[in-house]
């Protein structure tokens, strides 16, 4: 008997069908990844299973104790994001649930804590449904993937890499079938047009005067032939209509979210310099004696374990935190800190009103960029507090993009972004002209982008002049 059974589950919000007749089950020891675009209803589905919401129709049946890790942050403010996540994980896992619902469990976790989570899940052997956009985690943990999009579920065997490969193959096969059907329709349309032309010619000739030289009975033969062609045209038109009705729709290509950032930092010009930099909280020193310099166009990974002080350092550079020693930022640089917190949970303003307050005019060009970013007119019109966490991150990124910032301080920028948005963010930042300082546990992101590393470990902060892929291999064994 499955530990979780979902049958024909349906839920609508206003005139939108969020979940449309969903059915699936989970067995003991099975880990299933639930993926899909931001706002597709993944967290809502977990809440329905947990009994926090009621569906419009359908069945949810569980046969064991349930543990639910929500993605919103909780626990003491003194803890880092990773420490909060680890504490919440430990509290849920300590219940020894048979069915485990995890909503973005790796957000803020460093590599050591992700390995810890994987070990705990393997030891627990619960039936686990996990919402995650962490590609490494899904590859390591998931037995299969359920993709939620447009209210429907599609199942894929294996982890993230298997899911992406299977989805690409399915799309290619569906597109091929669609194109073959379209070619057949076009060929039949051309045959109908040619046959109709021949029938019209036959009708015209069948009415020519006897002086035209037609033999006795020839007109009748041509008229009969024209009628046969008319009949075939009608039959072929009916056949074409049946083909159109039975033809598959063109498969929807995955939405490609486009970010456009035009940083203005002059390359090779020194924009930041630290001398004997340090930070203490009472008697506890995060780091001391750090000296380094960054130049325009640098792409730097800020690496350290949870609680090492990465967010604190970003706040120091942004002018929001005190420090020891010297920290100089070029007057021509505009450090823009994009935080990992959620700033819109308590506001009643619409997304558009927030953007207008921040940016002034939000005209046609700005709206096109917002749409490319994945923020639709519907989302702009709703209260900002109603945005999913991923949509909130996109909103913060939109503000930086529209301000044309040239020095981005990114604190876990891929947290809560869906998979297509993560991949496209990597593509965009790869062509960004400004300076990047990225604190992230997303190894895919850091390997792709970063050409140097600020290594914050063991109470020391040092600049390592090698790309992150080489640093991870030589210093971390990853």
Image: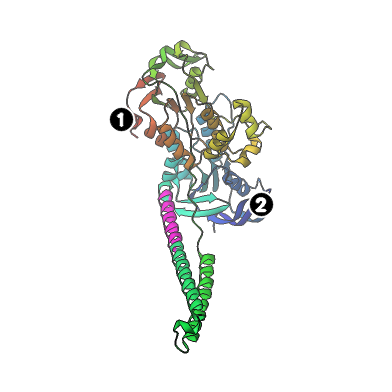
Determine if residue 116 is in view.
Answer: no
Using the image, tell me which numbered label, if any, was put on residue 55: 2
**Is 251 drawn above or below residue 264 in the view shown?**
below
Instruction: Report the quarter where the C terminus lies.
Output: top left
The crowd level at tag 1 (other Cα within 10 Å; few <14, some 14-19, many 20+) is few
Q: Is residue 116 left or right of residue 98?
A: left
SS class, disc 2? loop
Instruction: Report the quarter where the N terminus lies.
Output: bottom right
User: Residue 73: x and y, percent?
Assistant: 58, 33
Q: Quick one: label 2 or label 1, which is nearer the N terminus?
A: 2
| Residue found 46% across the figure and 68% down from its top | 188
Using the image, tell me which numbered label, if any, was put on residue 370: none
**Is 353 drawn above or below residue 44 in the view shown?**
above
User: Residue 328: x and y, percent?
Assistant: 45, 12
User: Residue 307: x and y, percent?
Assistant: 48, 25
Question: In this orientation, which residue lies closer to the viewer: 228 or 442?
Answer: 228
Verify whether residue 206 appears in magenta: no
How far, Cα to Cα, is label 2 from label 1?
A: 51 Å
The crowd level at tag 2 (other Cα within 10 Å; few <14, some 14-19, many 20+) is some
SS class, disc 1? helix
| Residue found 49% across the figure and 49% down from its top | 32
Question: What's the magenta bit mostly, secondary-structure-wise?
Answer: helix
**Is 162 drawn above or below residue 318 in the view shown?**
below
Question: In this orientation, which residue lies closer to the viewer: 5 or 337?
Answer: 337
Task: Give the residues drawn in magenta, as a range.
Answer: 163-180
Using the image, tell me which numbered label, if any, was put on residue 474: 1
Question: In this orientation, which residue lies closer to the viewer: 89 or 111?
Answer: 111
Residues at marks 2 and 1 touching, judged by CB atoms closer than 8 Å = no
């Amino acid at each position: 008997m499955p530990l979780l059974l979902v049958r024909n589950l349906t839920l609508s919000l206003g005139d939108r069908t969020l979940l449309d007749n969903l059915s699936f089950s989970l067995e003991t020891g099975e880990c299933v990844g639930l993926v899909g675009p931001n706002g597709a209803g993944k967290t809502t589905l977990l809440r329905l299973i947990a009994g926090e919401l009621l569906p419009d129709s359908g069945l949810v049946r569980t046969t064991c104790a349930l543990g639910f890790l929500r993605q919103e942050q909780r626990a003491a403010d003194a803890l880092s994001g990773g420490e909060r996540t680890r504490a919440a994980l430990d509290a849920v896992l300590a219940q020894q649930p048979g069915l485990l619902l995890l909503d973005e469990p790796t957000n803020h976790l460093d590599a050591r804590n992700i390995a810890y989570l994987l070990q705990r899940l393997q030891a627990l052997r619960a039936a686990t449904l996990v919402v995650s956009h962490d590609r490494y985690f899904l590859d390591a943990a998931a037995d299969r993937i359920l993709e939620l999009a447009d209210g429907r579920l599609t199942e894929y065997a294996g982890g993230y890499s298997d899911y992406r490969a299977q989805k690409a193959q399915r799309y290619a096969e569906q597109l091929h079938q669609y194109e073959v059907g379209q070619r057949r329709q076009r060929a039949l349309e051309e045959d109908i047009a040619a046959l109709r032309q021949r029938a019209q010619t036959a009708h015209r000739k069948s009415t020519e005067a006897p002086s035209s030289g037609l033999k006795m009975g020839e007109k009748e033969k041509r008229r009969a032939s024209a009628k046969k062609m008319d009949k075939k045209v009608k039959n072929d038109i009916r056949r074409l209509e049946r083909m159109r009705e039975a033809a598959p729709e063109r498969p929807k290509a995955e939405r490609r979210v486009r970010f456009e950032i035009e940083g203005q930092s002059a390359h090779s010009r020194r924009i930041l310099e630290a001398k004997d930099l340090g930070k203490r909280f009472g008697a506890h020193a995060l780091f001391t004696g750090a000296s380094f310099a960054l130049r325009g166009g640098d792409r730097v990974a800020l690496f350290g374990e949870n609680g090492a002080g990465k967010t604190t350092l970003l706040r120091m550079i942004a002018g929001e935190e005190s420090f020891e020693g010297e920290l100089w930022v070029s007057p021509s640089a505009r450090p823009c800190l994009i935080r990992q917190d959620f700033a819109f949970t308590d506001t009643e303003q619409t997304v558009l009103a927030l953007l207008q307050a921040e940016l002034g005019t939000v005209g046609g060009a700005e709206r096109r960029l917002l749409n490319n970013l994945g923020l639709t007119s519907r989302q702009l019109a709703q209260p900002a507090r109603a945005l999913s966490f991923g949509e909130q991150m996109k909103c913060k990124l939109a503000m930086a993009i529209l301000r044309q910032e040239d020095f981005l301080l990114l604190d876990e920028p891929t947290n809560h972004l869906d998979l297509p948005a993560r991949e496209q963010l990597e593509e965009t930042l790869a062509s960004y002209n400004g300076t990047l300082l990225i604190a992230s546990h997303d190894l895919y992101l850091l390997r792709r982008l970063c050409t140097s590393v600020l290594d914050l470990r063991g109470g020391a902060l040092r600049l390592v002049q090698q790309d992150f892929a080489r640093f991870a291999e030589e210093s971390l064994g990853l």
